[in-house]
Amino acid sequence: MSKGHTIPLLHLAHLLLRRSIVITVFTTPANYPFIADFLSNTTASIIVLPFPQNNPEIPSGVESTDKLSSMSLFHLFSLATKHMQPDFERKLETLRSSVNFIAFDGFLWWVAESAMKFGIPKLLFLGSNNYSSCLLKAVLEDGLLSRPELDNDELMTVRQFPWIKVNRNDFDPLFTGAELKGPPLEHLSKVNIAHSLCDGFITNSFYQLESILVDYWNTRNKQKSWCVGPLCLAKKLQKIERDEPFYKKPSWIRWLDLKLNEGSSVLYAAFGSQAEISQEQLNEIANGLEESKVNFLWVIRKKESELGEGFLERVKERGIIVRDWVDQMEILMHKSVKGFLSHCGWNSVLESLCAGVPILAWPMMAEQHLNARMVVEEIKVGLRVETCNGSVRGFVKKEGLTKMVKELMEGEKGAEVREKMKEVSNMANKAMEEGTGSSWRTLDNLIEEICSSKQ
Ligand code: UDP
């Protein structure tokens, strides 16, 4: 469905392969090359199902959310995937006796029904953390989002977690059900049904990061949240330490090497695979980065977006723009990278934690606002950009960006979060240690429990 779900699920596949578990991945033609590359030199098999072409709003070849022309098509897209179900079930039928469990992307909600039909245990993959799931559940339980007297930016205390303060703007209407109708409402109810049918949740997080929230969830819900991450560490050895003779460094990594040799540090700026940034906002980012005077590597996803005249020339000594797909983990692990201006997609946050790079949070959609609260207020490993109206969803002018970029890279508060980041990074890496880490052991327990439940 999206890179933010595909990548961690493939990392999970790697962890299972390392335990000699047989893996079969279902995907679609356009997603096949990415997946085949990710699983190259492994024993995993890949089954390609045709993608339904029955919705004129989704042009042929668009088979993941990052290829959609607008995120407003997201719900229609997810609903359209249902047409893959008959082909999926025909294939599953031939495999059923050897399948111990299915791990599936929650946006492919119909997989839960198919697994039920064949009596196969099913684990729903959540691209998010326990912090956001627990907060969402808590505010919905208490009706906090529908209190008319509160302004959208007014902070409220969450009864169940009294040290946490959130406001209405932290919650995406997509998840709260507020003002939803038509395809978004239909989609949300399908996803909710999949949640209720599944046997547990695979969570890309680690116990030490949010232990109170994990315990809270697991003592109140029949379906356990299994923290088996940070999954981005699964391929660490293969992906990052690339000494192979055939590995040719991309130009941006060579540029980072150069900056490291000069003894200077770099801010990495990237907003994930699907954030939609207006041209006006893009211009402010460019101006803000230029005025901050820091070195920066900025990944821009939309090929068609323009930068102001002369910008590249003016910043050429200390900034580069990349419009290709990058290996983000490789960038974050580069020794020259000392800060990450991020939209706080959960994978990006985890990757930054693993690499020990403090975050300048700029949440945009989905549960990113809650992730930003977690980064800044809960784990204290990041700062936030300043919006011009003070609202977490406000426009960011160049001044609000410049000020906070400088603070993160050179200021006192930046130094504090950098120090804290070292501690958290250590914990994250420990959690994934083979054999002994908490996440490693949780995955072992999960496999044992789920396999014993299938007779
Ligand atoms: N990513 C990448 N290269 C890119 C853009 C994104 O490797 O050029 C990866 C990134 O490392 C992360 C995922 O894509 O693993 C994006 O997930 P995230 O949750 O951060 O954001 P989303 O794209 O879902 O908003």
Image: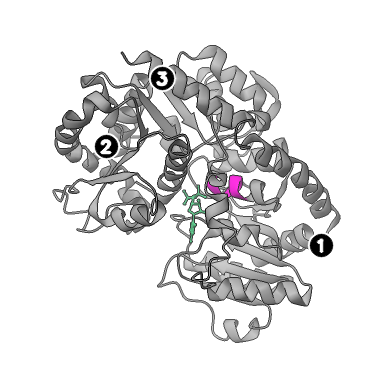
Furthest toward the right, the residue is 412
Disc nearer the start of the sequence (2/1): 2
- Residue at the spot of label 2: 182
Disc nearer the start of the sequence (1/3): 1
Quadrant of the image occupied by residue 159: top right
Q: Which of marks 3 and 2 is in front?
A: 3
Label 3 Cα neighbours within 10 Å, binned few <14 / some 14-19 / many ≥20: some
Q: Position of residue 365 (x, y in %)?
A: 49, 46
Q: Is residue 246 above or below residue 114?
A: below
Q: Nearer the viewer, mark 1 or mark 3?
A: 3
Label 2 – label 1 distance at C-alpha: 48 Å
Label 3 – label 2 distance at C-alpha: 36 Å
Q: What residue type is labelled 3?
A: Ile
Which residue is nearer to you in this view: 254 or 18? 18
Disc nearer the start of the sequence (3/2): 2
* Residue 187 appears left or right of 207: left
Q: What residue type is labelled 2?
A: Gly
Which residue is nearer to you in this view: 433 or 342? 433
Q: In this view, does 289 lie above or below 446?
A: below
- Residue at the spot of label 1: 410
Q: What residue type is labelled 1?
A: Glu
Q: Position of residue 442 (x, y in %)?
A: 55, 26
Residues at marks 3 and 2 touching, judged by CB atoms closer than 8 Å: no
Q: Give the range drawn in magenta.
A: 347-351
Which residue is nearer to you in this view: 153 or 353? 353
